[in-house]
Each structure stands twice: as C-alpha cells, then as structure tokens.
Image: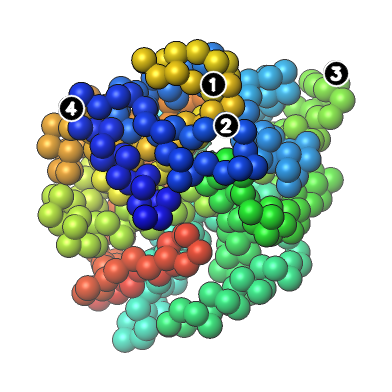
Amino acid sequence: MSAEAELARIGQALLEPGAPALLRCPALEKPAYPGRVFVAARHDVASAILCDTARFSLRHYDDLLEQVLPGTRYLVGENDAKRQVRLRLLHAAQGWLDAQRGANAGDVPPNLAPAFRNWIGAMAREEAERVLDRLTRRAHGAAPINFVREYAFLIAWRIARRIIGVPAPHRVPLPVRLVAALRNISRPGPWLRLQGEQGASLTMLLMLQPLFGHVFGTVTTSPGWMQWLSRQMAQPSLAAIDRAFDLPGVAPAHSLLAALAAVEPQFAEVADYRLQARSLIFELTGAMVLIVGKSLAEIAGFAASAQGAEAGLDWITLVTHLSARDHGWARRDAAVNEALRLVGGSRLMRTVRHDGTWRAISLAAQDRVVVLTDAASRDPAAFADPGRFAPDPARPYITSGPLEGPHVCYGRGMAWTIMAEAIAATAGRIVPAPDARLTNFAGLPDDLPFTALYQ
Ligand code: HEM
C-alpha cells in the first residue's frame, strides 16, 4: 500500500467511534528524520492541534525555507522576534494603505474590514470583467476557454500585481521554460505560451510551485531534486521583489510594496528591513497567486462535476449564492467556506515541541503531526450531513487553518472576496462545457473547459 493510501486509511480509521486522537503512520517516516509521524483527522483534534502553539510548533516551515532560501521566512512559522517584526511591518503598511484610501476599519481587524473588502471586491470585479470581455470575444465558435489558466490563475495574478505590487521577473528562468515545455508536450489541447500577461502569470506560478510543494507538502524531509528546483525557481522571484523595492515609485500606488517602502523610515532600528519586507511580499504573493488561483479552479471543477451536483453544489447554484451581494459578506463567505470544505484536499503539518502525553498519546519532541484538514472538514461529529453543500455562517470551518491564536490566515477576507467576485462575474458570460472535468499537472489544476454564452 502506498504512503498516500495508508494515510487515507488512517484518516478514515480516526473518524470511527472510539478511535484514538492520533494514529502513527510509519509509512511516512524516513530514516533521515529522527521523529515519528502521527496523523490527526477528527475536527476537534485538528482544531486543538492547530490552536495549541505551546505544544505544537510551526518551526518546520522555517527549517524547510532555510534549506533552500536562507534568511527568507513566512509568517506561517515560529512566532519568534523576526516574525514579530514582520507583523509590525505588515500592520504599519496596512495602516498606511488605509490612510491613503481614507478608510477606517473601526472595531474589526483592518484586513477583514468591510471597506477593505469592498475595495478588493471592486478590483476583483473589474479584473474579472476585463478578462471575460477578452475571453468571450475570442471564444465564440473557437476552442473552449481554459478556466484554470485563462481565468482563475490569471485573475489571481492580476490582483496580486495590484494589491501586492510585485512585477514578474523580466527574464523567464530556464527551469520555468523546461517545466512549461514538459507540460505542453504531455497535455492535450493548446500550448501555454510564456508571453504577455498570460505568460507572466504562468511564470510566477511555476516559480512558486516547487517551493510550495517543498514547504507545505513535506512531512519530514523532501528529496534533493525538489530542494534544488525550489531554489532555482524561487530565487528569480525574490530578485524581482528586490528590484521592485529599488523602484518603489513604479509599484501600484495602493499596493503593499508601495506601502512597505513608504513606512520604511518608521523602522530605522530594523537592520534587515529589506529582508523582512521581502519575505512578507514573497509569502503574500505566493498565497495570492497560487492558493487563490488553485482554490478558485478547484471550486469551479467541483461545481462543474457530477460529484458537485450530488452534493447540491452545481455551477448555477454556486454562481447564484455568490452573486447575492445584498445579503452582505457573511452569507457569501459561508458559501465559499462550504465550497472549499467539499473540495477538500488540504493538510497541515505541526512538530511536537516537548516529550509528553497529549490526549492519552505519548509524544516525543520532533514527532510530526499531519493534520488532515480535509478529513476534519467532513467529520460527521462536526458537520451534520457532511457531504452536502449547506452554507451557514454558524458551520464550523477549518480549511484556512487555525481559527484563533497567532496563526489565523491573514488573507482570508481578501481571498474569499476575490473568489466570490470572480465566480459571480461569470453569470451570463461563461459556463462549464458539457462533461467538463478538471485536470491537473504537477499537483496543480491545469485545465477546465468552459464555453462562452451568446449575449
Ligand atoms: C483560498 C485561499 C486561501 C486558503 C485556503 C488559505 C489557507 C490558509 C491556511 C490553511 C493557513 C494556515 C497554515 C498553517 O497554520 O499551517 C493560512 C495562513 C495564512 N494565510 Fe492563508 N489562505 C488563503 C489565502 C490567503 C491569501 C490571499 C493571503 C494573503 C494575501 C493569505 C495569507 C496567509 C498568511 C500570511 C498566513 C499565515 C498566518 C500566520 O501564521 O501568521 N492567505 N492560510
């Protein structure tokens, strides 16, 4: 049995009545790593682990990044002094942006404030309309639209450009060309070109993809080739951020990059300001370009499938829910949460800090815990009728990680806004082609055929 099949079996076993909180998965252990590997799947167990940073650390994200990009860190990592600096930078930059736009967040965190979300939403609508205008002009009577590449990842990239402000590298790195060529010869349909804006979005995505696999997909250690590829692909992206910092006037005026350049004088005591600011830009660009594009494509793929229809989430239902702007964000967010919950597929990692017993399981420092958030998202103890689409703001939610504590997803409000607007904008313009099926390449969505509606 493969390690993946074993993991799935353990995930099922953990949801059985009377199952322990964690089960060990020797199939995922490696001689090169000193700790054992445990798996968590129940919703209450997964939530408890993600929120308990005193017992379960995020330092493996730091270690994995350090292996390939020394000095670069994500906010998803150990809550050390440098992370505190990055948080201060981010909050100062967000405050500067709000002041520029004359926005006042009131009592809510600025990244979740309705005025901020409405601003992001307006931008997402505008970008979606522009892309749809082009696609529908082209598509009548021609080849189907590739929703993944020509819509989801393109919109995510265009919005990342505007909100975060980082340009594409001005040269396409050789490994990116090779991976794109591999994709083109191994997949049917039109070739992806590394030219124009579509090319910029593809280049950025391909540059980030191996690193995300290395940092977020590694249970204990990743193979040497993946570390090499991550380094080769990600370094040009960091270099592009450095160049953008040298020319901050070129960044969009209301972007995070412009804001971080503007607040730099407030942080004279931070000797490595550029390194910390670059880490922030890099992390948020990755989240926006890769995770938002991927999630958007996967939600569309699910809603276009027979499985989606069985769950009560066909394409028209999804578009209808997300177009209901007059109901405020809570109901639209609930629909996005439910769609992500049903799409599933994600898992998170934690490392045990100290030897000790947790929920009757004896754990040792350095043991790893794989938190199956997809299994937790379908735990019948937390979700009545877990296979049904049942949007409700009261439903528990775990797909964007811990819901409290220092590691709550910073970009959730932005991501949910962009995905809702991008899907709502398709109403009356494009729909899934008959028998549309989402296909993947190298672990990411690659194609989902849509057709244009005549207007
Ligand atoms: C559908 C889109 C998204 C999903 C599903 C998602 C999911 C997640 C998850 C699961 C975590 C927790 C990771 C862990 O604890 O190990 C997380 C954290 C985070 N996310 Fe998101 N995310 C999304 C979009 C975004 C966007 C657009 C941004 C920023 C532009 C963002 C920024 C962050 C940051 C900075 C953290 C780290 C929080 C911390 O540890 O301080 N996310 N996200």
Out of 217 and 361, give the one closest to the viewer: 361
Task: Determine the secondary structure under disc 3.
Answer: loop
**Of circles 3 and 2, which is in front?**
2
Q: How far is mark 1 from mark 2, CA to CA? A: 7 Å
Respond yes or no on whether mark 4 lies under 8 Å from ligand 1. no
Residue type indicated by callout 4: Pro
Mark toward the start of the polypeptide (1 vs 3): 3
Respond yes or no on whether mark 3 lies under 8 Å from ligand 1. no
Image position of 65 (left or right of 429): right
Cβ atoms at labels 4 and 3 below 8 Å apart: no
Q: How far is mark 4 from mark 2, CA to CA? A: 28 Å
Cβ atoms at labels 1 and 2 below 8 Å apart: yes
User: Who's the residue at 54% across and 28% down the image?
Assistant: 367
Mark toward the start of the polypeptide (4 vs 2): 4
Residue 440 appears at what percent x and percent y? 42, 65
Image position of 187 (left or right of 97): left
**Mark number displayed over residue 35:** 2
Residue type indicated by callout 1: Ala
**Mark number displayed over residue 269:** 3
Image position of 183 (left or right of 246): left
Q: Bin the neighbour count of mark 1 within 10 Å (Cα to Cα): few under 14, some 14-19, many 20 and up.
A: some
- Residue under pointer 4: 17
Q: Is residue 114 visible?
A: yes
Residue type indicated by callout 3: Glu
Mark toward the start of the polypeptide (1 vs 2): 2
Task: Determine the secondary structure under disc 1.
Answer: loop
User: Who's the residue at 33% across and 24% down the image?
Assistant: 21
